[in-house]
Structure formats: structure tokens, C-alpha cells
Image (cartoon, rainbow, N blue to C red):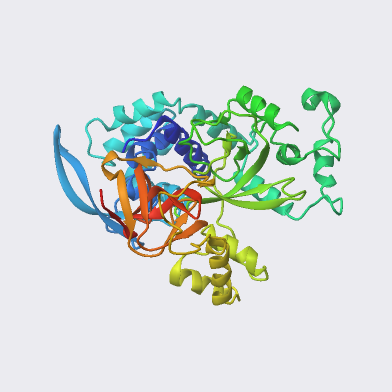
Amino acid sequence: MAATREQQAAFIEKIAPLIVKYAAERGYKNVSAAIAQACLESGYGLSRLAWQYHNYFGLKCGKSWTGAFANMRTNEEYTPGILTQIADNFRAYDDIESGVRGYYDFLEYPRYKAARQQDTPEEYLKELKAASYATSSGYVENNMNVVRAHNLTEWDERLKKNQEGNETMYSRQSVVNLVNSWVGKKESDGSHKSIIDIYNTLPADKLPRKTKMMYGWAWCACTWSALAVKLNYLAIMPIEISCYYLIEAAKKMGVWQENDDYITEPGDAILYDWQDSGTGDNTGNPDHVGTVTYVNRDSGYMVVTEGNYGNAVKKRTISLNGRYIRGFITPKYDDGAVAEPERTGGKSVSEIAHEAIAGQWGNGAERKRNMEAAGYDYDVVQAEINRIVNGGAAKADNDNSVDQTQPIARKVISSCYASHADKAIAGTYITTADLYCRNDAGKNKKALCLIPKGTEVQCYGYYSVYGGVKWLYIQFTMDGTQYTGFSSGEFLKKTS
């Protein structure tokens, strides 16, 4: 599947700062070519070799590699114009940063020495091609097309500034660390005032709309803005004390992202609209803002640290494709690396349970092993997870509860969207077991209700995928309530 324009931009913003970092350390004069290589070789991070093994440059093992590897099929052009498919071993890395570092380690082979001294992307690529980095006859031009399409030479200028020591490095990790250090500040003891005080250190002529923040006002936008002030990130992070004007400032800065396909990263801001109807793109007035501090695509969750969440700085765990998301602010960081949250002891059972639901402690045996190593009672934490996820699920009152001809008194609708559509799966289904209807696809998502075995439900052709399983977006009525949500296709049998 080809990457969308938004996915391409997001991948570049994530990997380019790391390439600049390691190119500067190793004394390279050009990075635009390497960024283009990462885009081309990995399909903008969407290839299996990239997303599973963090090899973004098609690096093969060779004779000297002693680390992890993956055997995969690839095409080589040994004879111009003729592609030959082969299977080979490719280097595997732990994360995106080690993958970028591995690329520059790979270039330490003597045959690639000349590339280090090249000022232009084209000459850099020609040197690599001459040293047999790739067999494709169009390798240089194909990469140059990527350089031109995304104006990647602007990153060459950043490399020069970095090496000259004239550029402030804007780091996602710094934003995440700072906002998480504020968790627990609250109105009840006045500790939230320190955040407002940071914002008000700006000179009057630098304050947006020349308006000083008052202690009694809603302070979610001020929390985001105080991060920018404290870190001196005003060049990349828009500031305001109003969510509406914060979006306007982000648009002027060119960092507002309203596309539903955008894959958020830690350090972004997320704007909410609690009045979102769920129909079409959300373009309503924003009500709240927080800072994304953790994203786990496998679990389908992100963690957002928010000021003025229940009059305090707290964390919220929400689905990646949830409703109420108005859009994102996506600052152009230089360093996109963010470390995995530390798995530490001494936290409450509830806090650990929420972290586990978001994917921070792994799954199955890995989760148990990690929790016990940190001193937690796995069974106690797992019981709390089950209570959070399934404890609020409505259950049928009697045998007539799921009569689908009954009148509808109210409706409960999932706050998450289905991500796929297929007319072939539309139809009537019967549940083959007692089955949870959930707010999103996945057993780790909150249950709306427990559907009795043998209940007739409708699917109109929409679904999402979690763990390789289709979760159908279904609708049915139980005890006068019409439910619309997700259930595992493994326990749904199509009847018509």
C-alpha cells in the first residue's frame, strides 16, 4: 500500500532529525540523500522490514553482521532492465534510532568512504552506487526525485547549522518529560499556578493578543503554551490561552493537522471537540487541548497529558481513531526520538492497569514478567484491568432482552470509527458465544455491553482490524437500548 502524502510527511519529520544527528556526529556533509534513501527503501516506513525490524535502508547482513536478522525476498537488478528475485538476510534493529545509527555504522565500510565528503545529494548517491550499495540502474535518479519532491535539501542546511553550533535542537523528548513532570499539579492546592506563572513571564508585547493569563481561567491551552515558553520552543510551538486561537496560531505557523489519517507522535498537541457528532470531518469549536506523551499503534491507544483535566494535570488514555479529536498541532522538531516510558515500581494498581491497557507493559507472558520484575502482583493488576475494560458492560435482563423488534428508548454509540469498508461483509449475523460489544476493535478496549449467545446483530459493511482479526462494526438492540460498536468477527456467524 502506497503511503499517503500525510504519511510521507510524518515519516520524514520523524526520521530526518535522527539522520541529522548521526550525520553530524560522523562528519557527513549531506543528509538529504540519506533521508531520500530511507523514504524509498522503506516505503516511508510502511514496509515490513521497516515497521517490524526498523531497517529503513535495505541493509543486508553480509559476512560481518552478528546481530538479529530477518530473511526476506527482494528484487535485484544485476543486469540493467532485468529484475531477479532473491531471498537474503537483512539486519534487524530494536527501534528507529538504532536503525539510523546502524545505517551510518554500515557506511563505515572502506568502500563507502568517499560518500562522507560529498556536499550534494546527487554526488553522495553516485558514490554509494559506484560502491555497490544498490543494484538498481535508476537508484540515483529515483532518490533524487524524492529529494526534489519533499525539498529535502532544507535538512542539509540544518545539518550545517548543527555542526556550526548555531541551531537550537528542538526535542520531542524534552516536551514529553516536562509536561509529565507537571502531573499532579492542581487547583485545590494552588500548585497549578506555577504553570500559569511560566506563561506570564513573556513580555506583554509577546503575549498573544497582549493578554495575561489569569489564575481563575481555564488553563489547558496555557499548559501547552507554558511548555513552549519554558523550553524556549516558541519558534516551533504556537502559543495561546484559547483553544480556538491556538488552532489559528498553528495554522499560521504551518503546523496544524486536520487529516484523519495523521499518525500522531509524542510531543504533538491534540485538540478535542466534545460536541463532535461523529459525521464527517470534525470542524467544530475546540473545547480542550493536551500533549501526546505516548503512542502505541499495536494497542491502538495513545496517552495524553492534559492541564485542567478535572482541575489538575492528569493523563488520559484514548483510542487512536477516537471521536472528539478536532485535530493536532505538529511542531517541526529536530530530534524526533522519544524513549519508551520507564517501567518502575511504587505506582498504584490503577495507574499500572491504565499503563498496561495502553500497551506500556507488553502482553501475555511478557506483561506478567515485566510486572513481577517491577514488584507488582500480576493477578491483582490484571483483575483491575478487567474491571476497567469490562466492569461497566451492560448485561441482558432476561430472555427477551435481545428481541430485535422491541422499541428503542435510547442509543449507545461507540466513540471510535471503523477504519475499513467492505460491502461483502454487510448482513445479518448471529453471536456464537456471549460476546462483548466494545468501544473500539480489540479486547483491550472498553466494553459497552455483553451480548448473549444467539443474538441477531446487523453489520453494514464496516470493520476495523486488531491483532489480525476483523472486528465488525455492528448494531443491535438490548433491553430497549440500541448499541453500535465493535465485536470480534471470530464469534459472529453470518446468516444472510
In the rendered view, tell whether residue 245 sits above or below residue 488: above
| Position in image of residue 389 (x %, y %) | 54, 61
Figure quadrant of the N terminus = top left
| Residue 193 picture quarter | top right
| Position in image of residue 445 (x %, y %) | 50, 56
In the rendered view, tell whether residue 385 sits above or below residue 113: below
Q: Residue at x 25, y 48 (%)?
A: 496
| Position in image of residue 50 (x %, y %) | 37, 48
Left or right of 246 on screen, residue 33: left
| Position in image of residue 191 (x %, y %) | 84, 51
The answer to whether residue 361 of the structure is visible from this angle is yes
Q: Residue at x 58, y 65 (%)?
A: 353
Left or right of 280 on screen, residue 326: right
Between 464 and 355, which is closer to the camera in this rendering? 464
Between 139 and 486, which is closer to the camera in this rendering? 486
Q: Residue at x 34, y 36 (%)?
A: 40
- Image label count: 0
Q: Residue at x 86, y 54 (%)?
A: 189
